[in-house]
């Protein structure tokens, strides 16, 4: 088995040796604790978050540095880091302790008004994009090059298109992809989240209450944050989200490109996704292709 076994016993030992003041608190896994990181409750008010592989480890220090700087500039709560753990002989990467925040992931059935939710999310992303980006982390391996050029995924996308020939409209999908590659962000680099997905949006009382997991965040092109338009919204709520985001046609084209890339590699079985993600990605591909036809 690759990598360390990340379980409650490991967390308990790390807490006992590095943060003994919290060693009496109970530890239990968080339901649906994530793939990039494994997450555990620590008592009633904290969580422990451990990267599951080396390529997620650089995100730890980034979040600890930048989340406290971003938080006062944003209209919704984001994670509050409390302490950063050290690697040791049995766990090789830095890890984090955060404040726990109540809430449920943003499934459609938990949201009172999807259009209102779209407006609130758009306002959060606008505020994030307007936050001071001085010295912020540029795209790189720490965030899988989100915020950078889509060229980095060109070969992978074209491989997926070959694998899916006859199962989707590969000619139209290629057109969408090439349209995305033909544009670039023309303004100064701005903050983006990098993974605006239902699992990183917390709902309380039917409303958007917090945005979590800034591991793929950075400073660059914000087009990657548009993927939620096709993953969560539809019809009127998608139009509300589009109108609420002051972005040019090229940025929306790149947003379709980022969304199409990920959906293609999921359905082409290049990303190790679960069946629910695969089924959703088929629908996302259809919606992105239709959106391209409607707006070009």
Image (cartoon, rainbow, N blue to C red):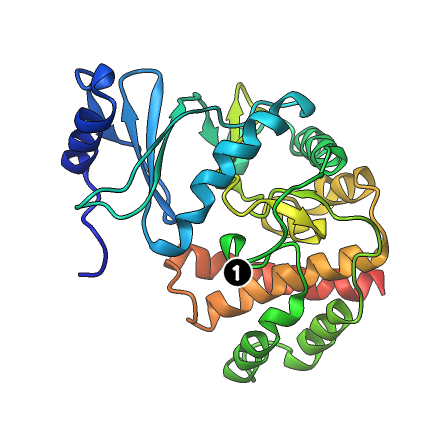
Q: Is mark 1 on a helix, strand or loop?
A: helix
Q: Check the image and report above or below for 245 versus 54.
A: above
73 displayed left or right of 105 = right
Q: Camera-side residue: 222 or 29? A: 222
- Residue 229 location (% of width, % of height): 67, 48
Q: Check the image and report above or below for 1 versus 214.
A: below
- Residue 276 location (% of width, % of height): 41, 54
Q: Camera-side residue: 114 or 208? A: 208
- Residue 231 location (% of width, % of height): 59, 50
Q: In which quarter of the image is the C terminus?
A: bottom right
x 75%, y 48%: residue: 189
Q: Hey, which quadrant is residue 124 in on the image? A: top right
Q: Camera-side residue: 27 or 279? A: 27
The reply to whether residue 229 is visible in this rendering is no
The reply to whether residue 160 is visible in this rendering is yes
Q: Hey, which quadrant is residue 67 in on the image? A: top right
């Amino acid at each position: 088995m690759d990598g360390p076994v990340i379980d409650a016993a490991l967390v308990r030992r790390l807490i006992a040796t590095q943060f003994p003041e919290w060693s009496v608190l109970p530890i239990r896994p968080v339901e649906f604790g994530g793939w990039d990181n494994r997450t555990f409750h620590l008592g009633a008010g904290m969580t422990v978050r451990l990267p599951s592989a080396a390529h997620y480890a650089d995100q730890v220090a980034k979040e600890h540095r930048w989340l406290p700087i971003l938080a006062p500039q944003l209209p919704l709560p984001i994670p509050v880091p409390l302490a950063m753990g050290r690697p040791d002989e049995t766990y090789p990467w830095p890890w984090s302790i955060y404040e726990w925040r109540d809430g449920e992931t943003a499934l459609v059935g938990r949201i009172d008004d999807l259009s209102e939710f779209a407006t609130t999310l758009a306002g959060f992303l606008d505020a994030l994009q307007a936050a001071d980006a001085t010295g912020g982390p540029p795209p790189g391996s720490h965030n899988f090059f989100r915020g950078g050029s889509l060229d980095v995924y060109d070969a992978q996308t074209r491989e997926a298109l070959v694998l899916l020939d006859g199962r989707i409209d590969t000619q139209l999908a290629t057109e969408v992809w090439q349209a995305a590659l033909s544009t670039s962000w023309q303004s100064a680099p701005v903050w983006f989240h990098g993974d605006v997905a239902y699992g990183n949006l917390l709902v309380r009382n039917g409303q958007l209450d917090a945005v979590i997991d800034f591991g793929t965040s950075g400073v660059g092109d914000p087009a990657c944050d548009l993927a939620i338009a096709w993953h969560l919204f539809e019809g009127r709520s998608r139009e509300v989200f589009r109108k609420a985001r002051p972005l040019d046609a090229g940025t929306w084209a790149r947003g379709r490109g980022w969304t199409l890339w990920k959906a293609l590699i999921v359905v082409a079985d290049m990303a190790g996704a679960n069946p629910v993600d695969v089924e959703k990605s088929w629908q996302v591909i259809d919606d992105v292709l239709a959106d391209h036809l409607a707006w070009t």
